[in-house]
Amino acid sequence: MKARNWTAVIAGLLVCLGAAYGAYTLATYSWNQVVDYRGPYAKQVLPAGEDPLDPSVIRLGPDPGLTVYVIVDGLREDASRNMPTLNALRAHGFDAVVRTSQPSLSFPNWTTLLSGAPQRISGVTTNWFEERVPVETLVDTALNAGRVVAVSAPTDFEMLYGVKRTGHVFLRDWDAGTYMSSGIVDNAIRLAKESSATLLIVHLPDVDEAGHEFGGSSKQYADTVAKVDADLGRLVTAMQGAGTTFVVTADHGHIDTGGHGGPEDIVTLVPAVFAGPGVRPGTAEGTQDQVAPTVALLAELPAPRNATGAPFDLSARGADVTRFARQLDAAYGAYTAAVTGSPGNTPRAATAGLGGRTAFDEATAQRLDTDRAGRLPVALGLAVLCLLAIAAVGMLSWRALVAALSGTAAYYLVYSGLYFIVHGYRWSLSSFNSEAMLKAYLNGRMTDAIIAGVIAAIVAADIYLALRAVPMRPKGEYLPGWLALGVATVLTIQATIGLQVAWYLWYWGASVNWYIPDLAMGFKYDLDLIQLTGLGAAAILAPVVTFLVGRYHPLRRTKQAVEPAEA
């Protein structure tokens, strides 16, 4: 028995540390899979004859007028209702609320707003993207159509969209603590007048900065929204005219405490307001990928070829949207081919009957089912290993199993209490406010796992004492059993987390190469792996904890009178 218990201590500790190392490696791999995701879609060539830039699909008028396209970074939909300038545009135009795709971060959503291509299509998933986006944008379509384009925005717009080629650009670096929107508006007005631009793109960054620093429900955030609205008013006053159309939207919102990236409604539902001579009054709900095609409709531009959304039905002139239907059919046909792996492009007849989007969704569902069937054996194997680990504890001692399961329950109560109640977090990328806080956030979750693991060991030792009529000191032949209890408790916790990881690996998989998973579940999966990593340290501490409880717990002393004399 003594030798077996020492073997259990050593073997159990090695398994716990191995699980921690494996989890850390898998967490790094899975996180990088999302960050480095590019997807197969932007590389697809659209079918011949369906090119939305073909002159036959659009007839530009002699004077397309000016379209002013404004992105207010980080503007919550509810806060937008308190903006007098924006409300004046609403009152004379079309008021939409659109939902962003995931993750709801700036670079990905800027790209959607300029291209109509969400993250899965564009391959832009984080703010660490540092190259020219691979999808066509309104800048591209306007320049190819011979239009004059002006841009006043942060310097990131050059890296992502190559806006300097327009020849009419003002770019500035992000400068924390400095109000930037007034200068951006001043230069937007100057550029538009100097160049006689027909498309003016303006990005206002300060609301987002206030959200990160003070939170989306703060007075400072509201004050910044009001200040930006005043600058928006100056832009509208300077640019308004008989042929001017205004489009004002946001890339994402902010949670009350500051942060975005997750699936919360306050983050993913944003305003999209359209006003001008070609816009009829109305309201609608939609998706963010519809905004760029709508801008193209109003500006009489070709739709960006990678767009997945149709323009809103807001034209006061009864505009012909056939070209947008053709573009969508072509795009979805190419995207369906990428999902199915079929050579060439999906035949037009295959998408025309069902609708391109329907065919794409069906192909996606079928491939997900196929992938899940392929991952099932590995996921089941991992689940079986987790169950065997728990069974091994029971084979060592039924009391140890009961105590370890009790400690496991305590672990989840403590960890969840720390995460959801003390810290106020959710399974969301919005939890860590900005990318700079990611490392500290993850280290904090590992610390929480260690704390919860130590408390779990204390609870397990308490239960183990209560289950024995004659508690034995952690001394002599009983020492390895007490040490094994600490390791067994952590191993049981890791096994139950491992079962959850096994489910995720079956349902979504560790690789992200053609489909972005549900990021709320993906975030939980990453946190599960972070917990498994932190529990490696808890496995080293837990035997010390169970030893100390067994040595000094009052319950042991109350039963000392009946404890047999030790040799």
Image (cartoon, grey):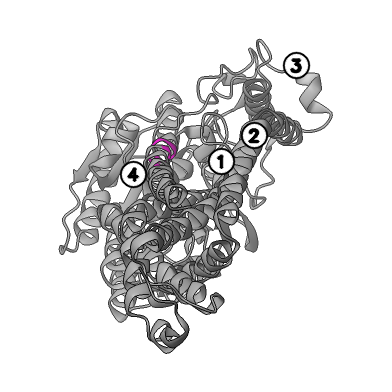
Residue at point 81%, 20% (across, down): 349
Q: Quadrant of residue 423?
A: bottom left
| Helix, strand or loop under label 1 | helix
Disc number lying in front (1 or 4): 4
Indicate which label's residue lies in the foreground, 1 or 3. Answer: 3
Whole-Å distance between the Cαs marked 2 and 4? 30 Å
| Residue interval drawn in magenta | 26-31
Query: Dominant secondary structure of the magenta stretch?
Result: helix
Say if 39 sits above or below 484 in the image: above
x, y percent for residue 431: 39, 62
Amino acid type, residue under disc 2 in the picture? Phe
Q: Which residue is mark 1?
A: 293
Q: CA distance from mark 3 to mark 4?
A: 36 Å
Which of the marked residues, 2 or 4, is nearer the chain's N terminus? 4
Q: Is residue 262 visible?
A: no
Rendered position, 425 above or below 298: below
Label 3: how many Cα within 10 Å (few below 14, some 14–19, many 20+): few
> Among all residues in the image, which is located at the extreme right?
353
- 554 over 101 or under it: above or below: below
Pick the quarter of the image with the C terminus.
bottom left
Mark before the other along the chain sequence, 3 or 4: 4
> Does the magenta run of residues contain 352?
no
Residue nearer the viewer, 256 or 293: 256
Q: Which residue is mark 3?
A: 347
**Side of 270 where 221 appears, left or right:** left
Residue contact at pointers 1 and 2, CB within 8 angstroms: yes
Q: Which residue is mark 2?
A: 324
Q: Amino acid at mark 3?
A: Pro
Rounded to the nearest whole Å, what is the CA distance between mark 1 and mark 2?
8 Å
**Horizontal placement of 22 versus 403: left or right?**
left
The answer to if 28 sits in the magenta stretch is: yes
